[in-house]
Image (cartoon, rainbow, N blue to C red):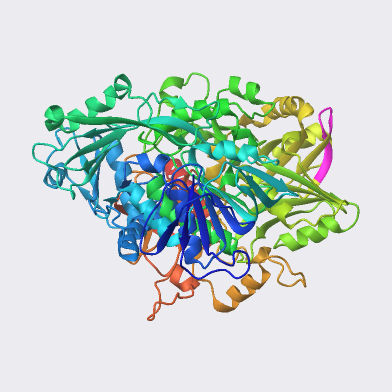
């Protein structure tokens, strides 16, 4: 028997003439605004949105859709409302998260849950406890200081405190091994089932389903359930542990890469001196534990080094039941808890809870519209932070469904950052065994996952590996970071982890020097590569509509362009080559493979004469960088490669060595001279060997992406996903010259850019060179550091690198002027940028910086040469 809770809210006259929302389920929630109706209930025949999953994530989406005015929504739950992971959640809401968008979501969730009691009259158990993030060593303390700087940018209250202050705030904490802590006074605890209940009451709906998705023509069409069929325009997969399996049920399978692990926490009975409910939450990441007050006692869990993955073969139970205790497995965390709070030696145990949690391949949740199926959305894979993220994530997804985009940059969470290649159950099982411990592991800049590797490799992988390549992974593709010269201590280099000057500093410096003075070769095969072809002008017409720059150029020309959204923000940043009149080669960043494909397909007309193909796997890409690159290629092709015969941003199909059909392009993505070679994979090893063999006389060497990063940042080159996102316009990053304002072409985003040009730009992408910063002794900037102008917060960095040319650190980032008298944004001017005194905050320490709107390279190179000439003159004089 199932029951239905019906709402007395305003009713929809179109789809559901007698109801606003409906949720079918076994559990009955009662409130003054709801009425229980017993007996079997039939589903409506159609709805604008169907949400699958009645946990706190699903009810949050329903709540926020209701707030946005939606009245035709059905929420389906296979068991009781909130009977899954929500019921077993530890109830902690903390803003101490690794990336900014997660901090924003947690901060919003905390505010939302606080006001729910007032909004609904339902006691949610909300208590503002604050939290203490402890540091047992200096590296952890540095990471907390970096987090504190980032939180202050978002207006979130936080304080770096000493161990003695920790003891004052939490009398049970043993502080003997602490070096400091981060205090977050606004963090809180709640009762997750009650929050879930309150959200459901506001959304005013309930439901039950054992469902199969049926997708038709790549559009969400209808949902078949054990209660009938619902036609729907939008479907939201909030199924938590079952999100992966639910995605596989549809005719067009939807990849939802997550996997379950067992998660343990301990409940004690009330202590002899019961803990006050406002006692701060303790997060001891070095000890791998957390602890919060619970009914006069303590709730404590953690993230162990040896997690236990579960449900690899799937799970079909209607409800998540508490699994078996495993005291042997929990023992290391219990020992850590007793070291941190020795008084608990005498505490009585109430229960050891074992519950499943779902984790994703990169420790970030999955959000957004799925690629290839319009109207199908996912919000799942919360990595044991479902309560903290649910409020903010539900808000952003509801905006996405309503407006077509969220009001914040959620690319780090977008499900399109993954493809089908990450959906292997074996891959997911192995990866989550690494992910779960990493939640509390100290993560220094540029750390890499160790599991699920060598999934996608270049044909040159083995060859480069034997030459000392050290690898990182991007979208499953192995890419060289740098190359260790013979004789180096490989073990110490591989284990180097620091916020300071890294051990690879001199190696990358030598690669950069070679790029500038001789020639280097970098394997860049991971780049996304598409071919768009047509029988007539269809390909050109589509690109002219999608791209902000003019693609109607002579054959062989390369155009750097953005693909913009209606707001003028970058959906993609790419290089497009016109191969012939009706054929184009599109090159995009590695992690844009799924997103870019989805964006193009979304706007492609259903025309059999227009064809888009992903050819990423067909070509190996070699980047030949340096002044001697033209000599190497000239010798291999017997063709002059000088700028007079091979101008910049041009493409020719040539022979290189014995291989024909090599697409040679005069660009390097760094601003340095050189060429990109796109080589059919069967020729890759031959061409590489020939290039290296001929290049020996010109001083050739292998280089990696760390050298590439240094080169591109000192040249003020912005990269999508790091510096550019869906809210960044060409006018904000100095790329107005790449917008075809002078053409009578109605490309996506044109109206927004014209309006922005009229109203003014309110933020600007700038370059900052650090001054009075000791590379050897001071902490390095990496990304996300606050930027101050004349002592006031003005923005944040988006990327940074050491410039071996300038012999200083270079940061890229955005700054904005303070709002006007009435709080309105103020247009930014060159004077604002050029006349300010700038500082970059690195873990609480501010360093002066020089800001510019153009690269420093030419100026500093001239000064450096003058300095070297003076030193040479002085030496000769002696």
So how many labels did they put on this image? 0
Q: Return the x and y of residue 696 as percentages of the image width and height.
A: 67, 27
Q: Return the x and y of residue 640 as percentages of the image width and height.
A: 81, 42
Q: Is residue 771 visible?
A: no
Quadrant location of the C terminus in the rendered image = top left
> Is residue 653 rendered magenta in the image?
yes
Q: Which residues are magenta?
A: 652-660
**Foreground: 647 or 409?**
409
Is 241 on the left-hand or right-hand side of 124?
right
Establish if 480 lies above or below 111.
above
Q: Return the x and y of residue 429 as percentages of the image width and height.
A: 51, 27
Residue at x 75% of width, y 26% of height: 690
**Foreground: 229 or 308?**
229
| Residue most extreme to the left | 273
Residue at x 49% of width, y 67% of height: 763
Q: Return the x and y of residue 588 as percentages of the image width and height.
A: 67, 47
> Is residue 793 rendered magenta in the image?
no
Q: Is residue 567 visible?
A: yes
| Residue most extreme to the right | 535
Q: Main secondary structure of the magenta part?
A: strand
Establish if 575 lies above or below 311.
below
**Foreground: 660 or 315?**
315
Residue at x 35% of width, y 35% of height: 440
Is 167 on the left-hand or right-hand side of 65?
left
| Residue most extreme to the front | 39
Establish if 745 lies above or below 211.
below
């Amino acid at each position: 028997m199932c029951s239905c809770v019906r709402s007395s809210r305003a009713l929809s006259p179109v789809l559901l003439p007698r109801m606003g929302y409906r949720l079918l389920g076994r559990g009955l929630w009662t409130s003054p605004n709801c009425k229980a109706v017993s007996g079997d209930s039939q589903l409506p025949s159609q709805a604008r949105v169907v949400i699958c999953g009645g946990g706190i994530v699903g009810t949050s989406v329903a709540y926020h859709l209701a707030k946005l005015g939606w009245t035709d929504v059905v929420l389906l739950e296979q068991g009781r409302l909130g009977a899954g992971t929500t019921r077993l959640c530890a109830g902690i809401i903390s803003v101490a998260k690794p990336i900014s968008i997660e901090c924003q979501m947690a901060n919003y969730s905390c505010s939302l849950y606080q006001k729910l009691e007032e909004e609904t009259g339902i006691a949610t158990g909300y208590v503002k406890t604050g939290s203490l993030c402890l540091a047992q060593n200096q590296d952890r303390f540095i990471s907390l200081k970096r987090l504190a700087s980032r939180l202050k940018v978002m207006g979130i209250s936080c304080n770096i405190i000493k161990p003695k202050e920790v003891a004052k705030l939490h009398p049970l904490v043993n502080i003997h091994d602490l070096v400091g802590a981060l205090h977050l006074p606004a963090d809180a605890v709640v009762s997750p089932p009650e929050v879930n209940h309150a959200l459901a009451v506001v959304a005013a709906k309930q439901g039950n389903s054992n469902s199969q998705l049926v997708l038709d023509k790549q559009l969400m069409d209808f949902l078949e359930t054990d209660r009938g069929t619902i036609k729907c325009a939008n479907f939201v997969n909030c199924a938590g542990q079952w999100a992966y399996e639910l995605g596989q049920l549809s005719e067009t399978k939807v990849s939802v890469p997550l996997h379950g692990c067992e998660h343990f926490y301990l409940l004690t009975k009330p202590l002899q001196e019961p803990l006050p409910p406002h006692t701060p939450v303790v997060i001891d990441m070095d000890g791998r534990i957390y602890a919060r007050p619970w009914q006069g006692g303590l709730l404590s869990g953690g993230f162990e080094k040896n997690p236990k993955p579960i449900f690899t073969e799937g799970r079909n139970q209607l409800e998540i039941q508490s699994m078996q205790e495993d005291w042997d497995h929990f023992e290391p965390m219990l020992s850590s808890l007793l070291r941190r709070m020795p008084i608990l030696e005498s505490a009585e145990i109430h229960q050891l809870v074992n519950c499943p949690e779902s984790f994703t391949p990169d420790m970030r949740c999955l959000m957004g519209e799925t690629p290839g199926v319009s109207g199908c959305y996912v919000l799942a894979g919360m990595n044991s932070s479902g309560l903290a993220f649910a409020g903010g994530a539900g808000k952003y997804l509801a905006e996405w469904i309503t407006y077509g985009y969220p009001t914040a940059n959620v690319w780090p969470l977008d499900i399109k950052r993954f493809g089908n290649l990450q959906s292997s159950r074996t891959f997911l099982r192995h990866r989550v065994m690494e992910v779960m411990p990493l939640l509390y592991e100290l993560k220094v800049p540029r750390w890499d996952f160790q599991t699920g590797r060598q999934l996608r490799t270049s044909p040159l992988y083995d060859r480069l590996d034997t030459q000392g390549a050290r690898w990182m992974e991007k979208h499953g593709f192995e890419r060289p970071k740098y190359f260790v010269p013979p004789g180096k201590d490989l073990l110490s280099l591989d284990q180097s982890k620091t916020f300071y000057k890294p051990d690879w500093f001199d190696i990358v410096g030598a690669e950069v020097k070679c790029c500038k003075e001789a020639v280097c070769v970098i394997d860049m095969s991971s780049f996304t590569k598409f071919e768009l072809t047509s029988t007539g002008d269809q390909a050109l017409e589509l690109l002219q509509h999608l791209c902000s720059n003019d693609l109607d150029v002579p054959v062989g020309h390369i155009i750097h362009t953005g693909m913009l959204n209606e707001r003028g923000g970058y959906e993609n940043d790419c290089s497009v080559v016109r191969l012939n009149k009706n054929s184009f080669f599109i090159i995009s960043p590695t992690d844009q493979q799924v997103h870019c494909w989805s964006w193009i397909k979304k706007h492609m007309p259903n025309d059999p004469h227009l064809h888009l193909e992903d050819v990423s796997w067909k070509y190996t890409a070699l980047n030949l960088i340096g002044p001697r690159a033209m000599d190497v290629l000239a010798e291999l092709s017997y063709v002059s490669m000088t700028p007079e015969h091979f101008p910049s941003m041009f493409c020719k199909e040539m022979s290189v060595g014995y291989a024909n059909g090599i697409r040679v392009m005069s660009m390097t993505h760094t601003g340095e001279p050189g060429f990109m070679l796109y080589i059919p994979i069967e020729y890759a090893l031959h061409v590489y060997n020939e290039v290296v063999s001929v290049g020996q006389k010109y001083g050739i060497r292998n280089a990696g992406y760390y050298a590439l990063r240094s080169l591109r940042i000192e040249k003020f080159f912005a990269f999508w996903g790091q510096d550019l996102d869906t809210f960044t316009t060409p006018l904000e990053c100095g790329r107005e010259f790449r917008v075809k304002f002078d053409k009578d072409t109605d490309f996506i985003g044109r109206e927004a850019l014209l309006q922005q040009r009229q109203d003014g730009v309110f933020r600007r992408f700038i370059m900052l060179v650090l001054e009075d910063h000791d590379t050897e002794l001071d902490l390095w900037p990496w990304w996300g550091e606050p930027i101050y102008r004349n002592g006031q917060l003005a923005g944040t960095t988006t990327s940074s690198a050491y410039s071996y040319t300038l012999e200083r650190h270079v940061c890229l980032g955005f700054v904005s002027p303070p709002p006007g008298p009435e709080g309105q944004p103020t247009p930014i001017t060159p004077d604002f940028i050029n006349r300010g005194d700038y500082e970059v905050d690195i873990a609480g320490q501010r360093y002066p910086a020089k800001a510019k709107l153009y690269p420093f390279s030419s100026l500093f190179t001239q000064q450096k040469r003058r300095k070297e000439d003076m030193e040479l003159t002085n030496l000769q004089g002696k």
